[in-house]
Amino acid sequence: MEKLKNTIEFLWEDRSFLSSEEARDAVIQVVDMVDKGQLRVAEPDGNKWKVNDWVKKAIVLYFPIQKMETIEIGPFEFHDKIPLKKGFANQGVRVVPHAIARFGSFIESGAILMPSYVNIGAWVGRGTMVDTWATVGSCAQIGRNVHLSGGVGIGGVLEPPQASPTIIEDDCFIGSRCIVVEGVRVRKEAVLGANVVLTQSTHIIDVSGDEPVTYKGEVPERSVVIPGSYTKRFPAGEYQVPCALIIGQRKPSTDTKVSLNDALREYNVAV
């Protein structure tokens, strides 16, 4: 593995060697390992996440060594450099037409893809449903038993290589039309109500206590979140700026599925 890593790092610095067979084999090997779940762009490291920069570099290098090809599937035709994943039955993944997952993404056994899109480098855990017209961007990490509701957009990131991908941890519920991008981390068992938008600059304000507490780039565990706004002063006057409001916590007294339903009912969260 160390030899493979060193080869990728060398090719990243000097791409003139990409034309060699050895270089191509190394890049393809890394992407194939990501596709099989043997390597991850990012992985849990205690309470933090470790980004494997060199794996992201290999994915970026995969594009220039691939040729544009016509892909025909029944009456459908595509023209692209990246092939589609295959063998879902053997992998134990349910894939509903017209779900698409690109080669180089990993879908764990037990996951369900409704008509949706999963990009290269992404990791989707078992028990997770990627619902209708939801998108999982390049290198995004989606945990186990997650529900990405209809129209959810999980942003991708390839460059810079050290940038953290967008991460949705285990047992989260992401409501309809939510957007989570720019490497935001949604921690375990959090619930995002419909239309929540999270970027690195979004104020995530906990209003459940006596005083507001503001987070950026991360939603704390078990938080129940809805869209909101706050007043910000500009040279031209005061205007409302979108934010996300933490209005409560999922209760630890019930199991994951029950507490999710309770959270939605108790806080009247739109999904």
Image: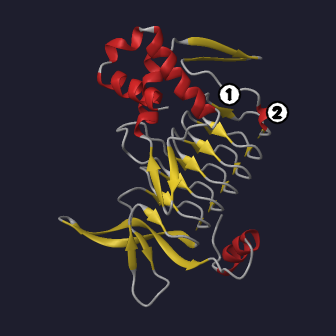
In the image, residue 223 lies at what x, y percent? 55, 72
Above or below, 69 relative to 97: above
Kindly identify which residue carries mark 2.
89
Residue at 57% from the left image edge and 22% from the top image edge = 82
Q: Nearer the viewer, residue 200 or 227?
A: 200
Question: Mark 2: which amino acid?
Answer: Ala
Left or right of 107? Residue 162 is: left
Residue at 37% from the left image edge and 38% from the top image edge = 161
Kindly identify which residue carries mark 1.
85
In the image, residue 33 lies at what x, y percent? 59, 31
Question: Mark 2 Cα within 10 Å, few/some/many (few <14, many 20+)?
Answer: few
Question: Judging from the image, what secondary structure is the residue with disc 1 in?
Answer: loop
Q: Quadrant of residue 7?
A: top left
Residue at 64% from the left image edge and 45% from the top image edge = 124
Query: Is residue 104 in view?
Result: no
Residue at 74% from the left image edge and 46% from the top image edge = 111
* Rendering colour mode: secondary structure
| Distance between mark 2 and mark 1 Cα atoms | 11 Å
Question: Mark 1: which amino acid?
Answer: Lys
